[in-house]
Amino acid sequence: MSAPTFKIETPKSLGTIVAQRLREAIIDGDFKLGELIAEETLATSFGVSRTPVREALNQLQLMGLVIVRPQRGSYVFEPSEDDVAALCEFRGLIEPRAAELAWRHDREATIAAVTAAIAEMSAARRQKDAVRYSRADTRLHEAFIDHCGNAYVQAAYATAGARIAALRTHLSAPGDVLHATGFEQHRRLLELFRAGDFGAYEQLMREHVAGTRTSYVASLKARAAAASQRPG
């Protein structure tokens, strides 16, 4: 006789629903890096009170997407060059290992997910749709994490995953849809994964992340230069 189950499906709170939608909006570039997020405007937009909006902003602060400054307001995060360097170093360490674990744990499902993401990225490049490309790029990298079979690796990646996804859209995807280098690296990563060649895989992933870091830093410098030339 099987043991009884007492699991209850609890409905999501309004704050969680707002947080999920706002997370998507930040990652998709609907809010700029460093932009003020007005609580009253959000509450009106969602048709809710300011209480769930505050709850949502607190949740997003834990994800690293929002900075809440007492007496000043809530802002979309804006990374420094040091932040970018640390984030890319983290990726260079964890992503190759996750891929190796995924190959051992759930190889075929990983290949299917990555293949679908590459097809979506190709379609986005044809349309020059940076947001669509960024979403598919994120799905590709997260496929290795999702199928690695190690909850601790997944939890570690989750601490930075939302920031990684947002930075793709804001800083690198507009160029990625125009230039083939990153796309071809993704295709090569899939080939190496299929072959189980993780020495070459790690080398290429580190090269890919280094290129991402260069792109991010260049974009940040361009943003800073443009901001310094604005009147007022």
Image (cartoon, helix red, strand yellow):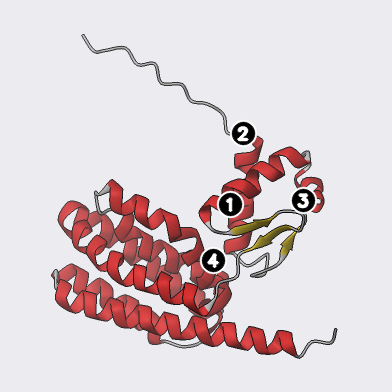
Residue 160 horizontal/vertical position (percent) = 44, 60
Q: Earlier in the sequence, mark 3 or mark 4?
A: 3
Asked if one can make out residue 70 in the rendered structure from this viewpoint, the answer is yes
Please give left or right for residue 112 compared with residue 211 in the image.
left
How far is mark 3 from mark 1, CA to CA?
13 Å
Dot 4 crowding, Cα within 10 Å, few <14, some 14–19, many 20+: many
For the residue marked with disc 2, what is the amino acid? Answer: Ser
Choose mark 4 or mark 1, whichever is in front: 1
Mark 2 or mark 3, which is nearer the start of the sequence?
Answer: 2
Task: Specify few, some or many for label 2: CA neighbours under 10 Å numbering under 14, 14-19, or 20 or more.
Answer: few
Q: What number is the disc on residue 166?
A: 4
Using the image, tell me which numbered label, if any, was put on residue 60.
Answer: 1
- Label 3 – label 2 distance at C-alpha: 17 Å
What's the residue type where badge 1 is placed? Leu
Query: Residue 161 placed where, x, y %?
Result: 44, 59
Residue depicted at 79% across the width and 42% down the height? 47
Counting from the top left corner in percent of width and height, residue 175 is at 52, 84
Neighbourhood count class around disc 1 (C-alpha, 10 Å): few under 14, some 14–19, many 20 upward: many
Distance from disc 4 to disc 1, alpha carbons, whole Å, reads 12 Å
Please give the residue where the numbered disc 2 appears in the rendered image: 13
Residue 65 lies in quadrant: bottom right
**Which of the two labelled residues, at mark 4 and mark 2, occupies the earlier sequence position?**
2
For the N terminus, the image quarter is top left
Looking at the rendered structure, the number of numbered marks drawn on it comes to 4
Residue in the image at 22% along x and 57% along y:
102
